[in-house]
Image (cartoon, rainbow, N blue to C red):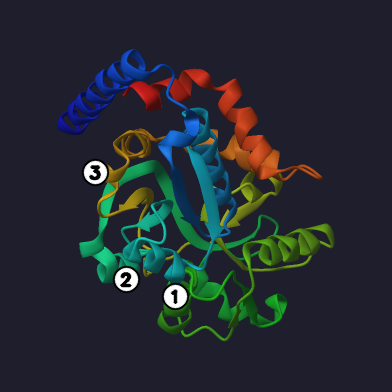
């Protein structure tokens, strides 16, 4: 960790010298000269929050930023082929492990930008079930189904393993993060039982009284991290953007602030991210000067 921080300081110090020389020789460097950073992400509330925040910071520093929403498989493929420059949405070591194994030689894993994530099956607190192992005894209460998210997501693959490992009499239904939370909200409003695929950080834990089911077989594994991963060659092509991405790191609580802002009626995730960046310049300065 100390070596990584030292390398960041060296990179940013070098960039400052180059920038200063450029200003002396040719006046103010125009923002458009820095080029465009292409960020890919998956439509999970956590990744919408983090990717928009990174976009806002990069734009503050003079970059144009394009954001592209993709499936998990397509996101890693775009990074591998160079169609995307970076993602701040790699859940490791378990959720996206297979994707990373496929593209590992063509990408640069910059390490975690957030610690303390978790995956599992989630039910309302009032549901009289506490363990995945007990779901079969109550399958009818859940209409014989688990409400999932987008097909191809690592969480869905792990949940398929859960269904097999526990020999569950429930069908995993794919959808999206939005349809999953809509189903959860509807069930809770009507005090009905429901089981959904869940992850932390997520705004539903602040909005609803819900709980994870115990996973005695540990199929979902322990706590994960969300990593920043960039395409091979980005450090040479855009060293300042690379340094910012390398330094980006925040807490589940900070991410949760943005996710809750995004749940407000008629809210705009990009505008919310810009507001959060403006209100938290002390945090942003740590990323820029780390």
The residue identified by callout 2 is 98
- Is 229 displayed left or right of 40 in the figure? left
Contact, CB < 8 Å: mark 2 with mark 1?
yes
Q: Alpha carbon of mark 2 to alpha carbon of mark 1: how far? A: 10 Å
Seen from the viewer's position, the closer of residues 28 and 41 is 28
Which numbered disc, 1 or 3, marks the residue that appears first in the sequence? Answer: 1
Residue at point 68% right, 49% down? Answer: 209
Sequence-earlier tag: 2 or 3: 2
Q: In front of the other: label 1 or label 3?
A: 3
- Provide residue 143's location: percent of width, then percent of height: 71, 81
Q: Pointer 1: what residue?
A: 157
Residue 250 visible in rendering: no
Q: Quadrant of the N terminus?
A: top left
Q: Is residue 163 left or right of residue 289?
A: right
| Residue on which disc 3 sits | 236
Q: Left of 66 or right of it: where is 229?
A: left
Mark 1 element type: helix
Residue 225: give x, y in percent of width and height.
37, 49
Distance of label 1 from label 3 (alpha carbons):
35 Å
Mark 3 element type: helix
- In the displayed orientation, state which residue is furthest to the left: 3
Q: Secondary structure at mark 2?
A: helix
Question: How many numbered discs sit on the rendered protein?
Answer: 3
Q: Which mark is residue 143?
A: none
Q: Nearer the viewer, mark 2 or mark 1?
A: 2
Asked if one can make out residue 202 in the rendered structure from this viewpoint, the answer is: yes
Q: Residue furthest front?
A: 26
The residue positioned 84% from the left and 62% from the top of the image is: 190
């Amino acid at each position: 960790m100390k070596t990584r921080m030292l390398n960041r300081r060296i990179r940013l110090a070098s960039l400052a010298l180059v920038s200063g020389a450029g200003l002396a020789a040719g006046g103010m460097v125009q923002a458009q000269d820095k080029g465009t950073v292409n960020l890919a992400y998956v439509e999970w509330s956590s990744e919408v929050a983090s990717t928009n925040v990174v976009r806002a910071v990069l734009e503050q520093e003079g970059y144009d930023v394009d954001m592209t929403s993709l499936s998990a498989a397509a996101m890693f493929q775009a990074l591998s082929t160079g169609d995307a420059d970076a993602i701040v949405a790699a859940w490791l070591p378990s959720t996206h492990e297979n994707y990373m194994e496929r593209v590992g030689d063509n990408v640069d894993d910059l390490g975690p930008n957030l610690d303390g994530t978790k995956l599992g099956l989630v039910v309302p607190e009032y549901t009289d079930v506490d363990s995945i192992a007990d779901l079969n005894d109550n399958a009818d209460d859940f209409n014989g189904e688990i409400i999932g998210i987008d097909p191809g997501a690592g969480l869905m693959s792990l949940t398929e393993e859960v269904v097999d490992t526990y020999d569950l009499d429930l069908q995993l239904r794919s959808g999206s993060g939005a349809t999953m939370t809509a189903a959860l909200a509807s069930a809770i409003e009507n005090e009905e039982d429901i089981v959904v695929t869940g992850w932390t950080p997520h705004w539903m834990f602040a909005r609803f009284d819900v709980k994870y089911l115990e996973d005695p077989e540990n199929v979902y594994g322990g706590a994960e991290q969300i990593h920043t991963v960039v395409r091979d060659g980005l450090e040479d092509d855009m060293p300042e953007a690379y340094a910012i991405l390398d330094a980006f790191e925040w807490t589940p609580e900070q991410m949760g602030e943005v996710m809750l802002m995004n749940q407000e009626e008629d809210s705009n995730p990009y505008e919310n991210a810009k507001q959060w960046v403006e209100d938290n310049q002390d945090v942003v300065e740590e990323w820029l000067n780390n």
